[in-house]
Image: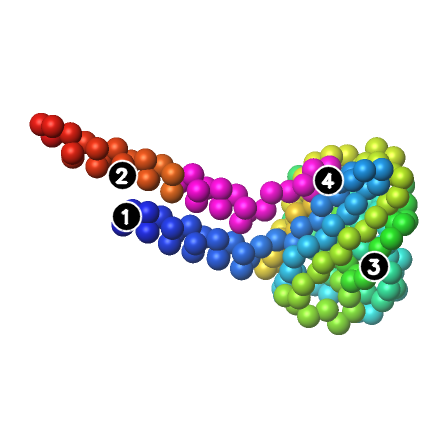
Amino acid sequence: MKLLTCAGAIIAAALMSVQAHAALFIVVEETGSDVQATLSGDLDVTGMTLAFAGAGATMGNVMASAGNIRFGVTSSVDIYSFPVSNISGGVTNFGTGPFISATSSPDPNFGIMLGAQPTPQLFVPTGFTSGGALNATMIFSNQTLASLGIAAGTINVTLPNDSIVLQLGTAVVSEPTTLAMLALGTTAVLAHRRRKRRGSELAPGA
């Protein structure tokens, strides 16, 4: 029982730690006859370089050849820059597709452009409070990943105090979910060992 309690406490602490430092996720996947892009999580921009404040930008679109995806409709955004070395593999695109506007893309504003020059850029709502939530769903009706020119894969972006995971083609399994599965597996193994040990103690001649 002590082993189970200890394991549960360790897993719970790990879950709390991961949830407190969870990445911002962008998942782009085919849903029926459409392509849906989902933005979810919080974003900490402390330590980043503010390149432009209150800049005008066209939102609600994707351009795979430029590594660009932008949620929202409001044109005013704050733009932060970060080095290309912060992108896994140093990639500056996620396909060959041209600029395509979304059918539906409500606020909040958020965007990332891996191929921006001279450095990659991050778009957030003007006056965005660091650590705030960013959740949105953008729809490209009657499109596929292929028609948008998006190549399936995962791109990780490391920021000074946060990270962004761009998952293209399949839904991402978050770290809390993975840890929860690990917790179940660990608990089952410990329970089995405890039952086995108790059986050995009760066996004749033991």
Q: CA distance from mark 4 to mark 1?
A: 43 Å
Q: Earlier in the sequence, mark 2 or mark 1?
A: 1
Span colored in magenta:
167-186
What SS does tag 3 mark? loop
For label 2, the residue is 194
For label 4, the residue is 168
Count of numbered labels shown in the rendering: 4
Q: CA distance from mark 3 to mark 1?
A: 50 Å
Q: CA distance from mark 3 to mark 4?
A: 20 Å
Residue at image point 44% right, 42% down: 184
For label 3, the residue is 106
Q: Looking at this view, name the residue that lies furthest to the left.
A: 205
Residue 31 visible in the picture: yes
Q: Nearer the viewer, residue 17 or 130?
A: 17
Q: Say which quarter of the image contains residue 145.
A: top right
10 Å crowding of disc 2: few (<14), some (14-19), many (20+): some
The dominant secondary structure in magenta is: helix
For label 1, the residue is 1
Which callout, 2 or 3, points to the residue nearer the camera? 2
Mark 2: amino acid: Arg
Which part of the image, by quadrant, shows the C terminus?
Answer: top left
Q: Residue 119 shows which numbered tag? A: none
Residue 151: image location, x then y, percent = 77, 34
Residue 68: image location, x then y, percent = 81, 48
Q: Nearer the viewer, residue 101 or 199?
A: 199
Q: Say which quarter of the image contains residue 153.
A: top right
Q: CA distance from mark 2 to mark 3?
A: 53 Å
